[in-house]
Amino acid sequence: MNTTRFGRPKFGGTQTKLITLSVAAGTAIAAAAGAIMAAFIHDDSPWLAFAVYSLCLLPIATAASWGFMVDRSTIRGATPDPEDSIESHWYSQASENTLHAMLFGIGGLGVVSSFWEFQVSGTMLTIILGVFVSCTFGISYFAHKRAAS
């Protein structure tokens, strides 16, 4: 099969068709998300909120749309069986380690909070847990990578 840099759609067509559909779908998704955020969260300047959210989400939505529509076998240089790669093994091990770290961390936080009364907003708690999980996963992934090298 003929491969290209960006691949071809799963449902048939050319690379140009895939890119056009990905950009169109990404634009629609980003605009819808921007409209929802502008309508329900930002009452003072909805057009500015719509523009900012839409522009920030456009690259991510376009890439996600491309990933959903592309046929992996038509991408030049793509790994044929990514689930059998060493990177997949490192990812699985890092995910397992992250789960265990979350269980210990949240359990420890529960014990500490029974002795020490403190208040944390939901937003701050989400940010703290997100940073903790991301850092734990990253450290574990690169530790497994380094151990295999």
Image: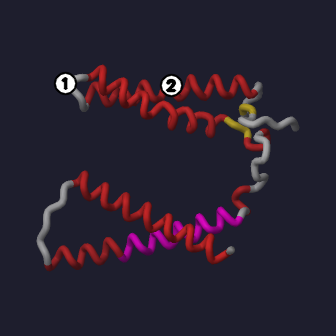
Q: Nearer the viewer, residue 51 or 99?
A: 51
Q: Which mark is residue 44?
A: 1
Q: Does residue 120 sit above or below 22 in this rendering?
A: below
Mark 2 or mark 1: whose residue is earlier in sequence: 2
Task: Give the quarter of the figure containing the C terminus.
Answer: bottom right
The structure residue drawn at horizontal position 57% and vertical position 71%, both measured from the top left corner, is 93
The structure residue drawn at horizontal position 42% and vertical position 73%, both measured from the top left corner, is 101
**Residue 116 horizontal side relative to residue 13, left or right:** left
The structure residue drawn at horizontal position 88% and vertical position 38%, both measured from the top left corner, is 1
* Rendering coords of residue 134 (x, y %): 44, 61
Where is mark 2, residue-wise? Answer: 27
Q: Does residue 27 sit above or below 119 in this rendering?
A: above
**Residue 42 horizontal side relative to residue 119, left or right:** right
Does dot 1 land on a helix, a strand or a loop?
Answer: loop
Q: Which residues are magenta?
A: 86-104
* Rendering coords of residue 142 (x, y %): 56, 68
